[in-house]
Amino acid sequence: MGTNDTITDGVPDVDERDRRNFLKILGVTGSVGAASELSLSDLRGAVGEESADELATYGERIRTDLAGGLDAGLLTEAVVGIESSIAELPELRAAGFPAERGTAYHEVAAPAWEAYDHLAEVGFFSAAERHLPEFSPDHVRATAAELIRAEPLTAALAEAGFDGRERTALVVDVVNENERLAQWVSTAKLPADPESYDPADVAPLHQRALGGALLWIDELDQHLWQREAILTEAMLDRGIWDVKAMLGGIHLFVSAARDLAGPEELADSQLTAALAGGSAIAIRGQEDVADDLFRITDAERAPRGGDRA
């Protein structure tokens, strides 16, 4: 693991195998992306545009469905609040494991919950599920290509506090885990199981993506205090990065909703990429935080009475 100016030791490295797989899925050939430091900006002119029209169709349908139903002021405040929460993560990491159960992680998630509640109330998540395709490998590839091409979207992540290495790590992970993302299906595709749940009671896909991420963040107030004895400093590094990734995905999604509510500066294809990409990043973050901080085996746990490093 390397070091960056924001989070120390938690950002996953993009190794040569990751790089090759990422470029292969995107269809990028030749020497582009083969530099020692893989950069999304270097790939901007190399990724294909063949899916842009299809993405634009999805975005246009969402705009038509939700015209006039969003609170631009509330969403703007939420975006600013999420950015502030991300900026607080280094201080939260420096504080380490809490000595008592507190509310620090709840407070970090609070601005995103404000946006989530509003989007759920106006039916935004339902509209996204109606008009966006599920996370097939092809849809993930098209979404990632548009994220790379669209400077406003990478700029939004930069404004949220993600440096170039971090932005690359987010997109590479989503692309390389496209088959895993494809397991997250729409509510209509869930199997009926009358003994345990009714699919009609399950939230839409993108609502599960954002809400699930926020629930994992909220749980850290209890979890880090309660299970400090088995967690290591390296695990906490990775967990803080996972929190940042989840908030980054939510920020991208909410920024797209804010644009739809007011400025409308994003093209329809960019709107689609921000919504789908933000959801995908939030999903991957919650899967990673579960593995990094919650599902700890005896072989991985901190030694009893030993060094926690």
Image: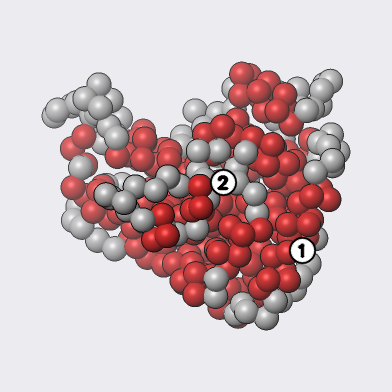
Pick the front one: 209 or 76: 209
Residue drawn 82% across and 23% down?
29
Q: Is residue 87 visible?
A: no
Pick the front one: 245 or 59: 59
Residue 207 placed where, x, y %?
49, 59
Identify the residue position indicated by label 2 in the image: 280
Q: Quadrant of residue 100?
A: bottom left
Residue type of the residue flagged with mark 1:
Glu
Q: Is residue 263 visible?
A: yes
Q: Is residue 261 above or below residue 32?
A: below
Residue 5 placed where, x, y %?
55, 44
Residue drawn 58% across and 57% down?
129
Q: Secondary structure at mark 2?
A: helix
Q: Nearer the viewer, mark 2 or mark 1?
A: 1
Q: Which disc, if any, is residue 60?
A: 1
Residue 72 placed where, x, y %?
63, 78
Residue type of the residue flagged with mark 2:
Ala
Label 1 neighbourhood size at 10 Å, few (<14), some (14-19), many (20+)? Answer: some
Q: Secondary structure at mark 1?
A: helix
